[in-house]
Image (tube, grey):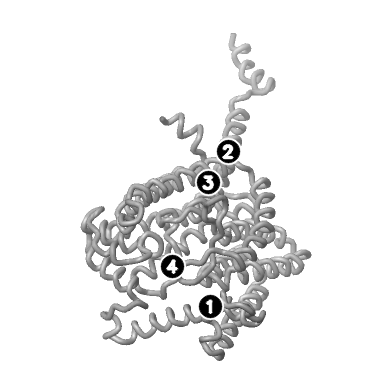
Amino acid sequence: MDNFLKRYLKGDYVIWMVYFTLLIISVVEMFSASSQFVPKSGIMTKLIEHAVHLGLGFILLLFVHLLDSKTIKMVAYLGLALSIGLLIYTSIKGLAAADGGTRWISVVGFQFQPSEVAKLSLIIVVANWIDRAQNPEYQKKTFVYMALIISLICGLILTENLSTSLLLFGVIILMMFIGSISFKRIMIFGGIIIGAVLLIFLVVNLIPKEKFMEDNTKENKTFVEKTLYKFKRVYIWNERIAAFVDGSKDDDLKYTINDENRQKQHAQIAIARGGAFGVMPGNSIQRNRIPEVSNDFIFAIIVEELGMLGGGIVIFLYLVLLFRAGKIAFKTETVYPSILVTGMALMIVIQALIHIGVAVGIGPVTGQPLPLISRGGTSILVNSVYFGIILGVSRSIANKENAQTLTDETETTTETPEETNLTQEPITQEL
């Protein structure tokens, strides 16, 4: 068994432990959360589907963590170009979600979320550009390229998934800051993007809601009407933010369950019911009352069944990942792998914290899944790639350290002819 681990599971063993522990928690909690699918397809069907996604993710991780950084970089540029086209196609022909967003496309019968590939590719490409920008002569030009491509990708994601767009933008800004990009440039770029988003919200709120919420299948819609329809989700976000703000101010609203806050209220009931040690797996009651329990609110069910102890362990696992990724980034000899590992870890951990924050009621509903635990094929596969890249960088560092250790040992044990003669000379004289 030990030989198998050393041969196939290379890299930081602590991160491997975090990965496998998250998978175990995912299977256990998805078995419980899948009870909502009993009337349609049964628990085992959904659980097997989830297990298949986890298995494919593990295979993908094994493959990715053996790749070198140049190959990952090349694939990322191709993936970025492909994801731009897919995001445009998704915006026009994508499959509608329950909340009205078009985030998926169907590929050979399987649903696929292009924004996940765009996130992954953009982080890798930006890490490469930050590396190039370390040369002051090229920083200005490189920053312009980064700003343009970041604006394009985040803008394409924005109209259908605001939280994902803001999450990706925030992670990249942190990567730039850690990568020693000019703070002035970062602030100007960030200010422009945030200002643009706020302007969109302002303009949309000045236009009657009916203009946005009309049925998009209506014939003879003008280009302006079709464009306005793409910003309909701004009203959805307005309603979510308003519900969060009003609920935090009005004590009566905190305890009133309606269609707008049903998921969030039942999630908080689940957390309160869990107590310190939970009601044990399979005994959740709120799993049947939260429509998106297996995606957006799985953490609430974890706390209900495993208690604050189980919820604390999940949070601890993500923080351990961030800590270990920081150590790996510190050991790298060049900027690119350092920023790459940092970006991967930040994306996983910040997304997890956002999901947890929504479940415990300290933020508006965002729809962000809990990495490697929530149900979702594309999300699981891409998060496995994040882990694979982090482990791949740690594997490269370990290989270099082992090679250096062998070199040092060889130099220490090898004696030169002069050293041999000096050692033997006193013996000869004594005889």
Q: Quadrant of the C terminus?
A: top right
**Cα–Cα gap, marks 2 and 3:** 12 Å
Q: Which residue is mark 3?
A: 391
Residue projecting furthest to the front: 219
Residue 250, picture quadrant: bottom left
Residue 20 at x, y = what percent? 41, 45
Q: Are marks 3 and 1 in contact (CB under 8 Å)?
A: no
Provide residue 60's location: percent of width, then percent of height: 53, 44
Question: Where does label 4 land, which residue?
Answer: 354
Q: Is residue 182 above or below residue 383?
A: below
Q: Which mark is residue 399?
A: 2
Query: Dividing the image into 4 quarters, which one contains the N terminus?
Result: top left
* Label 3 SS: helix
Residue 343, visible in the rendered structure:
no
Residue 354, horizontal then vertical, whole percent: 43, 67
Residue at horizontal 45%, vertical 43%? 55
Residue that numbered label 1 is attached to = 215
Dot 4 or dot 2: first in sequence order is 4
